[in-house]
Amino acid sequence: VQLQASGGGLVQAGGSLRLSCAASGFIFSTKVMGWFRQAHGKEREFVAAVGRFGTTDYTGSVKGRFTISRDNAKNTLYLEMKSLKPEDTAVYYCVGDDTVQHIKAFGPKYWGQGTLVTVSS
């Protein structure tokens, strides 16, 4: 299993970024996919998830600002981030598992390498 995240970078507060995650080694369309993040000195936290048929789930702090989506034909996951805040600064990880509940309760089965997002004030 490989999850290759990209698209991170440095952006000013209020700006936007789009993260992508290219998946391989498993049947992408059958899995719930999502994003976690980890800020410096803090634990990893759930950000968003998208189900096999497009149902989405977000943590409260990103609702209305972030949009998760997937392209099953391209085996790619996306995270559109708008109105970014300094507190969004973190390493963002692409993840996958069988259910959203499992992702949230036990942590995802599949993890990719992270991509760093830095939001300056």
Image (cartoon, rainbow, N blue to C red):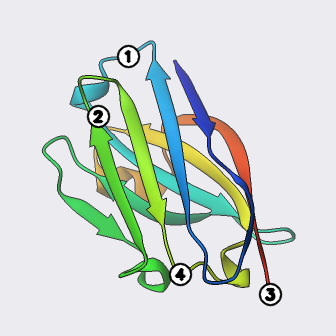
Q: Position of residue 40 (x, y in %)?
A: 85, 68
In three-dimensional space, the C-alpha distance between marks 3 and 4, rounded to whole angstroms, equals 12 Å
Residue 39 seen in the current view = yes
Mark 1, residue position: 26
Circle 4 or circle 1, nearest the eye: 4
**Residue at 46% over, 24% down:** 23
**Residue at 45% over, 55% down:** 79
Residue type marked 3? Ser
106 in relation to 32, above or below: below
Q: Nearer the viewer, residue 81 or 31?
A: 81
Which comes before the other along the chain, label 3 or label 1? 1
Q: Position of residue 16 (x, y in %)?
A: 56, 68
Residue 121: image tag = 3
In three-dimensional space, the C-alpha distance between marks 2 and 3, rounded to whole angstroms, equals 36 Å
Work out which quarter of the rendered image holds the C terminus and state it.
bottom right
In three-dimensional space, the C-alpha distance between marks 4 and 1, rounded to whole angstroms, equals 33 Å
Residue type marked 1? Phe
In three-dimensional space, the C-alpha distance between marks 2 and 4, rounded to whole angstroms, equals 29 Å
Mark 4, residue position: 83
Residue 31: image tag = 2
47 in relation to 28, above or below: below
Which comes before the other along the chain, label 4 or label 1? 1
In three-dimensional space, the C-alpha distance between marks 3 and 1, rounded to whole angstroms, equals 39 Å
Callout 2 crowding tier (Cα within 10 Å): few <14, some 14–19, many ≥20: some
Q: Position of residue 77 (x, y in %)?
A: 40, 40
